[in-house]
Image (spheres, rainbow, N blue to C red):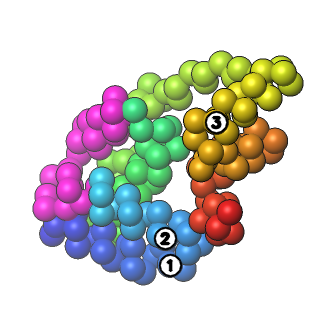
Amino acid sequence: MLFKFFAEIWINTVVPVTCEPSTLSDYKGKLKNHILPVFGKQEITKIKKKHVKDFLRKKFSKGYAHSTISHLKDILSGIFNAAIEDEIIENNPALNLGKTLIKKKEKEEIIILEYKELLEFLELFNRNKPEYWHIVLTMALSGVRIGECLALQERHQF
């Protein structure tokens, strides 16, 4: 039995009734772009804890966020649980991976601009990239991150 078979069962039956639609969409994307290319054609009985650790370590070394890696682990765990329920495997290789597997990146130092520096920065931005000035202004005044600001832009079309 291929991993892909249980992935399809899990994403189509378990996730829609246990998660929000946005989570389902996120999981589908991660499954398609990250997990299935690596595990999809493997027999689920041959996938061991070592394979899961190696997969997650590679994602970490490529700079993926801790939350992304955690979601990938959760997806893998859910799929392996589906195989356990069907009595195909006995243990979930995505569980108990150890605390040393994924360490959160140290947070970068936040630089807070003085009022005068902020005005200079906004003026410089307005001169050189006026098409993005409203985004930078919104971020500066509200404290939202770039992804949050771009999501606002998509919804409200500045």
Which residue is the site of mark 2? 24
Which mark is on residue 155? none
In terms of image quadrants, where is residue 80? bottom left
Report, in whole angstroms, how far the alpha carbon at label 1 lies from the one at label 3. Answer: 48 Å
Residue 48 falls within the magenta-colored stretch: yes
Mark 1 or mark 2, earlier in chain: 1
Residue 134 falls within the magenta-colored stretch: no
Identify whether 114 is placed above or below 34.
Answer: above
SS type, badge 2: helix
Amino acid under disc 1? Pro
In percent of width and height, residue 135 lies at 67, 48
How many marks can you see? 3
Amino acid under disc 3? Arg
Front label number (1 vs 3): 3
Q: Are marks 1 and 2 in contact (CB under 8 Å)?
A: yes
Image quarter in which the N terminus is found = bottom left
Which residue is the site of mark 1? 16
Report the magenta residues as a range.
Answer: 35-62
Report, in whole angstroms, how far the alpha carbon at label 2 lies from the one at label 3. Answer: 42 Å
Identify whether 13 is placed above or below 55.
Answer: below
Amino acid under disc 2? Leu
SS type, badge 1: helix
The crowd level at tag 3 (other Cα within 10 Å; few <14, some 14-19, many 20+) is few
Relative horizontal placement of residue 105, taking residue 87 as reference (left or right): right
Which mark is on residue 127? 3
In terms of image quadrants, where is residue 84? bottom left
Report, in whole angstroms, how far the alpha carbon at label 1 lies from the one at label 2. Answer: 6 Å
Front label number (2 vs 3): 3
Closest to the observer, 108 or 35: 108
What secondary structure prevails in the magenta region? helix
